[in-house]
Amino acid sequence: MKQILFMLSALLFCCCSSDSEVNAVEPAQAGKTLVVYYSYTGNCRAIVNTLTSQIQADVVEIQPAEKGLKYEANGYALGTQLLNAIQANPNDLSSYPAIDPVETSLGDYENIIIVTPLWWSQMAAIMQTYLFQSASAMAGKHVAMIVSSHSSGISGVVSDARRLLPEVTWMGDALWINASNHANRLSLIEAWLKNLNFAEGQTTMEKMYITIGGQTQSVTLVDNAATRALVEKLKQAPVTVTLNSSGGFEIWGALGFSLPTSNQQTTAEAGDVILYNGSNICLFYGSNSWSYTRLGKIDDLSGSELQSFLKAGESNINVRLALDNMTSIRASLTPDPSLKGEGSIYSMNGQRVKNPTKGIYVKDGKKIAL
Ligand SMILES: Cc1cc2nc3c(=O)[nH]c(=O)nc-3n(C[C@H](O)[C@H](O)[C@H](O)COP(=O)(O)O)c2cc1C
């Protein structure tokens, strides 16, 4: 009976919706990933286990506050009733079934993967509660979704997700796992993650440090062949490049060497560190879409701070790339050419000093004693 009901609903659903729409991929961000799931009969839990065997992620399970309910009893009466209540009044939290409190701080995560069952071609009511109450905390996050159904198409769940989370960046199309392909979920999830650049983009590596005009900022690198080669290069010695502003969104220029590419159509955003054409580095203070290889993201700077740090609009900008910010050690051996400019005086760790006292400093790229 269950199968017939679902097949009927699947047929009905297929007539009025399309699951074949393909959206552009927004690749996973460098940083931490959270997997949020709800599972009533265990399929989503199995999907999460498979998923977390392939990426590093924290996992949180959403639980209904009321335990032991039978959503499928009496022809799925309770499940239907919960969904109808949400549909009748979707902007009111009291329309949603109560869930246990979730302690996880969403602010710690760059990427969130939602794994949810489909109920009557909609998102399972319990997961809807969590997303409704987390919408503002998730704003700006990169979010992807896996939907598990018996056989119905998932467009209705995708619509629910977009309604519940209007301010997130969707990474690409949701992955649909159903009764007929559940056993193949390993390869399905693997291909889906690769498409979202998760396999390479999700794990964080060591930091790189960028110094411009005496200010040093850390960069969280993504883990891919390009960053691994870059790290090897920087282990030998820091690299200084000369970059120029371009297009009102980046400073860029030749690295002087090539790195392996894994180019993908990418919308680069402010703070992104990107490899272009295999041998050019681009530091973004605005946004642009192109076929790029991601290297990482500059940490903790606002849009205006980035513009100032990257000297947006200027030309011939000296940019030093290194694996540590121990400017002091290097400055004591060789003055750092990037610590030049306007006669300013810098401490040995690269901070501009307004009123230097007695000591060793860097001025116009040279070490001086006061
Ligand atoms: C209340 C309820 C309604 C459901 N409605 C549908 C449906 O309309 N179409 C479908 O294909 N599957 C439907 N299912 C089946 C689930 O989507 C499917 O079994 C899913 O894999 C369950 O995930 P879980 O085991 O993690 O809870 C429904 C299940 C429940 C409990």
Image (tube, grey):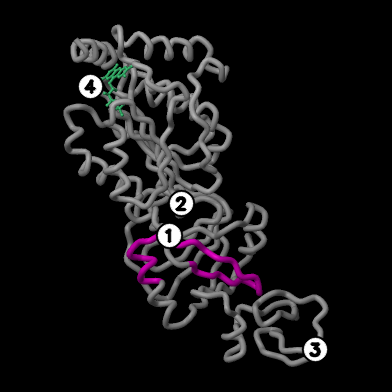
Q: Vertically, is 163 above or below 102?
A: above
Q: Which residue matches tag 3?
A: 358
Mark 3 Cα shell of 10 Å, populated few (<14), some (14-19), many (≥20): few
**Measured Cα–Cα span from mark 3 to mark 1:** 40 Å
Lower sequence index among marks 3 and 1: 1
Horizontal and vertical percent for residue 330? 57, 85
In which quarter of the view is residue 285 placed? bottom right
Q: Are marks 2 and 1 in contact (CB under 8 Å)?
A: yes
In which quarter of the view is residue 149 placed? top left
**Measured Cα–Cα span from mark 4 to mark 3:** 75 Å
Horizontal and vertical percent for residue 236? 42, 83
Specify the segment rendered in magenta. Answer: 207-230
Q: Vertically, is 370 above or below 316?
A: below
Identified by mark 4, the residue type is Ser
Mark 4 Cα shell of 10 Å, populated few (<14), some (14-19), many (≥20): many
Identified by mark 2, the residue type is Lys
Lower sequence index among marks 2 and 4: 2
- Decide whether residue 221 is among the magenta residues: yes
296 or 50, nearer to the observer = 50
Q: Are marks 2 and 3 in contact (CB under 8 Å)?
A: no
Q: Are marks 4 and 3 in contact (CB under 8 Å)?
A: no
Identified by mark 1, the residue type is Thr
Q: Vertically, is 363 above or below 192?
A: below
Q: What's the residue at 33%, 62% (across, down)? A: 261
Q: Which residue matches tag 1?
A: 204
> Is residue 241 visible in this depiction of the protein?
no
